[in-house]
Amino acid sequence: MSSTEITLRVVNAISDVAPAAWDACANPTCEVGAKIDYNPFISHDFLCSLELSGSVRNRAGWQPMHLVAEAGGELVGAVPCYAKSHSQGEYVFDPQKPREWNRGAFLVDGPAHCGACHTPKSILGGDKTAQYLQGSYLQDWSAPDITNDASRGLGHWTVDDIVTYLKTGHNRTTAATGPMAEAVDLSFSKLTDDDAKAIATYLKSLPGRQDTPAPLSRDAPVMIAGSAIYRDQCAACHGLDGKGIARLFPSIADSSMVRSDDPSTAIRIVLRGARSVATDAEPTAPGMPSYSWLLTDEQVAAVLTYMRNAWGGAAVEVKPSEVTRLKSSLAPRPD
């Protein structure tokens, strides 16, 4: 049986597992129909660690079911979960919310599929719905938190800031680069003003997380080193106050991306540079040069740590090992 695949499926009820087994399970979720290699030691704890794309507790239309794992036609494990039939897959209007909010929710979760990049994924590729739109990692980029989190998300953006960013790729604090530049160029810049505002309204309604790390002391050696590097290499464009120039050089002081839990995008931009998107409304497409030829991994980590903790910001220190890892991963990539 060691070569047999396990098939995961959802059923209404399962009588083969003793009810006492459910006590240790915390309503897991899993990608229905997925197949994984058989493990003779598969356990309830393993099944409980799996997550189902789109599963949300106590949400209208979601019913308590059971996730079962079968191998060679035999039941090898089962845990409770929440599931929704495909016939119920259409968007359900929330009468407690305004029409604009509902339109935004439909666009974000449907045609715009924002969660494909911005929601973390489970081992099976399903969305970790407990971290909905709180940032993820793909193609050596970190897609940022786009909830209304004040530290790492859109908390300091207005609805107009989001609309302008989606429609033009630029706003008063930042510019779209990487995969988001492509999304703006080919998709979001074509939105109607009403749809862009609906998306912004919905995103601003998402609370995000409440935890905020303590800032590093300005007297910490890494902050002193980072400050000196910033003055020498970055301040000419981004300013000593980190504010940059609106619609030309992004504001580092106001950048939630710089303070993201995952610093991969910030590291990548410093190492390889970046070109912002050109749109009909903002055709200039300012760029930033690469610094990998000039700064060591330790210096890149120091200057980013300074940016993340200066001007009222707070984020964990970037380690040189993180820079080294990403540099190695980027080496074979042409993009």
Image (cartoon, grey):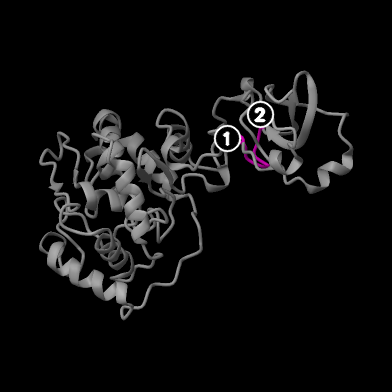
The answer to whether the residues at label 2 and label 1 have Cβ atoms under 8 Å apart is: yes
Is residue 86 left or right of 294 when viewed as pictured? right
For the N terminus, the quadrant is top right
Residue 129: mark in rendering: none
Is residue 81 left or right of 265 when viewed as pictured? right
For the point 27% across and 41% down, the residue is 331
Is residue 189 left or right of 112 when viewed as pictured? left
Q: Amino acid at mark 1?
A: Gly
Which of the pair 48/190 is nearer the observer? 48
Which of the pair 298/195 is nearer the observer? 298
Query: Which quadrant of the figure has residue 18?
Result: top right
| Residue 196, x across and y down, in percent | 33, 38
| Residue 144, x across and y down, in percent | 38, 48
Q: Main secondary structure of the magenta part?
A: loop
**Secondary element at tag 2:** loop
Is residue 121 left or right of 293 when viewed as pictured? right
Identify residue for label 2: 84
> Which range is magenta?
52-61
Identify residue for label 1: 54
| Residue 269, x across and y down, in percent | 24, 49
For the point 50% across and 57% down, the residue is 209
Mark 2, other Cα within 10 Å: few <14 / some 14–19 / many ≥20 = some
For the point 42% across and 46% down, the residue is 203
Query: Which quadrant of the figure has residue 322?
Result: bottom left
Q: Amino acid at mark 2?
A: Lys
Magenta-span inclusion, residue 195: no
**Secondary element at tag 1:** loop
Residue 253 shows in this picture: no
First-in-chain label (2 vs 1): 1
**With respect to residue 179, does 212 lie above or below?**
below
State the separation of the CA atoms marked 2 and 1: 9 Å
- In the orientation shown, which residue stands out farthest toward the bottom? 219
